[in-house]
Image: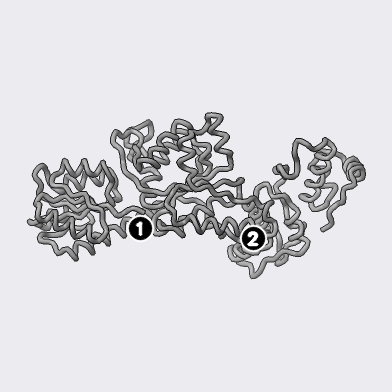
């Protein structure tokens, strides 16, 4: 993570250099200016995390710079210094949003304490803003289970947390990409800063651009106030963009600019803003193929895929299902105020045999639904209701080399497993008479699962 940036505005060269040297000695990056015009130019070159401003300046005063900064980014704390402090001036400064008001000569140690407190308050405000934007509850540990596939993922994840580079997570829907992204953030150098996540597939181009980069008042119809984008909210932290493959081609150049130059513009703004974030992206698509089909920019793809990570599907780690189920049921029991929830052996077997097209998200839904509808502590096979709108047709079960009879047999076996071996229910789902299904079962020598 980069150093904290401080904008220092002081027209007296001796004081300016003394404060600059003091702050740089404490690992701050300082942009020292002697007038308002220089301060504004320095602000646009690299957005500061805090500002220290003298009140009396050659081309204005500290209140003007305070107003300029707060109108541009209300989260940046401003500490005002003056040699002629009055109660009226202090009250006015605080009303305009000053973090603190100190009289000169200022003691450097006291200034450092005030600055540190101001930056901590700013981080707290950013976290609140990030939490308000984040929907849903906290999810599972991304590495539950003993399978080789998940152990390999855990080992890779531990290696990349310290590398402050873009990460691209590949995986099917429901495998836990958001969970892994949050884990990487919480275990990396930016863990004390905001984590912001957004599913790019949920927005139109116009709304997505506004969500990511913000907009100025009057930028478009309905923009009655200025709004910071998620990149600003995530400043110094991490931004997780799920389904980045669905980002409109017109927005992709702005994403590339943020990653390469750490700059962007709000909609309706003419100046660039500086932002320091780590991007974690995710997709279930083949982005390399999307590049060849001109649906995704090649330069953006190579920029975001510096560190590629693949999450295995639940089909590839079925030995983890008992452990995942235990965690999910434990959390569900606490939420429902139940003393205990557990799976019967036959229920666990049924979970192992199912193909899980919706992966961990579907597993959680099935178990939570069973827990809510069951009055017993032990969940029986009859309590497990799988999503009837999803059929587990995956590349491992079906391929273009199979005969029609082989495909039909595999399809019937899948539906029978999902229906817990109930031929009548399977026949209804397949849209055939029960007698016709029995005939197919006999023809294909299918063993009806028993639970």
Q: Residue furthest top?
A: 294
Label 1 sits on residue: 124
Which residue is located at x 63 percent, y 67 percent? 338
Q: Is residue 334 above or below residue 242?
A: below
**Dots 2 and 1: beta carbons under 8 Å?**
no
Check the image and tell me how it is coloured: one colour
Which residue is located at x 55 percent, y 34 percent? 290
Q: Residue furthest bottom?
A: 339
Viewer-nearest residue: 252 or 287:
287
Viewer-nearest residue: 125 or 178:
178
Which residue is located at x 32 percent, y 36 percent? 217
Label 2 sits on residue: 324
* Spot occupied by residue 399 in the image (x, y as percentages of width and height): 75, 39
Badge 1 element: helix
Of circles 2 and 1, the one toward us is 2
* Spot occupied by residue 426 in the image (x, y as percentages of width and height): 81, 45
Q: Quadrant of residue 411?
A: top right
Q: Residues within 10 Å of mark 2 (few under 14, many from 20)?
A: many
Q: Quadrant of residue 1?
A: bottom left
Badge 2 element: helix
* Spot occupied by residue 2 in the image (x, y as percentages of width and height): 33, 53
Q: Is residue 19 above or below residue 408?
A: below
Left or right for 159, reference 21: right
Which residue is located at x 47 percent, y 51 percent? 134
């Amino acid at each position: 993570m980069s150093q904290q940036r401080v904008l220092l505005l002081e027209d007296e060269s001796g004081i300016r250099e003394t404060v600059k040297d003091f702050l740089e000695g404490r690992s701050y990056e300082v942009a020292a200016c002697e007038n308002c015009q220089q301060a504004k130019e320095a602000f646009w070159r690299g957005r500061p995390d805090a500002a220290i401003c003298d009140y009396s300046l050659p081309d204005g005063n500290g209140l003007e710079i305070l107003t300029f900064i707060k109108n541009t980014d209300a989260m940046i704390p401003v500490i005002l210094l003056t040699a002629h402090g009055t109660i009226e001036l202090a009250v006015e400064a605080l009303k305009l949003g000053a973090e603190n008001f100190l009289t000169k000569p200022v003691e450097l140690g006291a200034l450092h304490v005030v600055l540190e407190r101001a930056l901590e308050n700013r981080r707290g405000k950013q976290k609140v803003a990030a939490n308000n934007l984040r929907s849903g509850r906290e999810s599972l540990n991304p590495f539950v289970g003993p399978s080789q596939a998940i152990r390999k993922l855990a080992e890779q994840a531990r290696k990349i947390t310290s590398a402050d580079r873009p990460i691209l997570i590949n995986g099917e829907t429901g495998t836990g990409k958001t969970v892994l992204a949050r884990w990487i953030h919480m275990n990396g150098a930016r863990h004390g800063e905001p984590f912001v996540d957004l599913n790019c597939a949920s927005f139109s181009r116009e709304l997505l651009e506004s969500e990511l980069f913000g907009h100025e008042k009057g930028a478009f119809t309905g923009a009655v106030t200025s709004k910071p984008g998620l990149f600003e909210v995530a400043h110094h932290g991490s931004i997780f963009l799920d389904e980045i493959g669905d980002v409109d081609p017109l927005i992709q150049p702005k994403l590339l600019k943020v990653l390469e130059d750490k700059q962007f513009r709000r909609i309706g703004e003419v100046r660039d803003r500086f932002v320091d974030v780590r991007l974690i992206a995710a997709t279930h698509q083949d982005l390399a193929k999307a590049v060849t089909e001109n649906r995704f920019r090649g330069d953006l793809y190579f920029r975001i895929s510096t560190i590629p990570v693949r999450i295995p599907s639940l089909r590839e780690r079925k030995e983890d299902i008992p452990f995942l189920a235990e965690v999910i049921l434990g959390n569900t029991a606490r939420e429902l105020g139940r003393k205990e929830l557990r799976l019967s052996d036959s229920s666990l077997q049924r979970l192992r045999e199912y193909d899980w097209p919706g992966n961990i998200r579907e597993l959680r839904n099935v178990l939570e639904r069973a827990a809510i509808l069951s009055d017993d502590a032990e969940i029986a096979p009859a309590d497990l209701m799988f999503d009837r709108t999803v059929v587990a047709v995956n590349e491992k079960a079906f391929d273009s080399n199979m005969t029609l009879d082989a495909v039909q047999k595999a399809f019937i076996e899948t539906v029978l497993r999902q229906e817990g071996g109930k031929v009548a229910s399977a026949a209804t789902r397949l849209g055939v008479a029960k007698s016709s299904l029995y005939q197919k079962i006999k023809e294909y020598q299918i063993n009806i699962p028993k639970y």
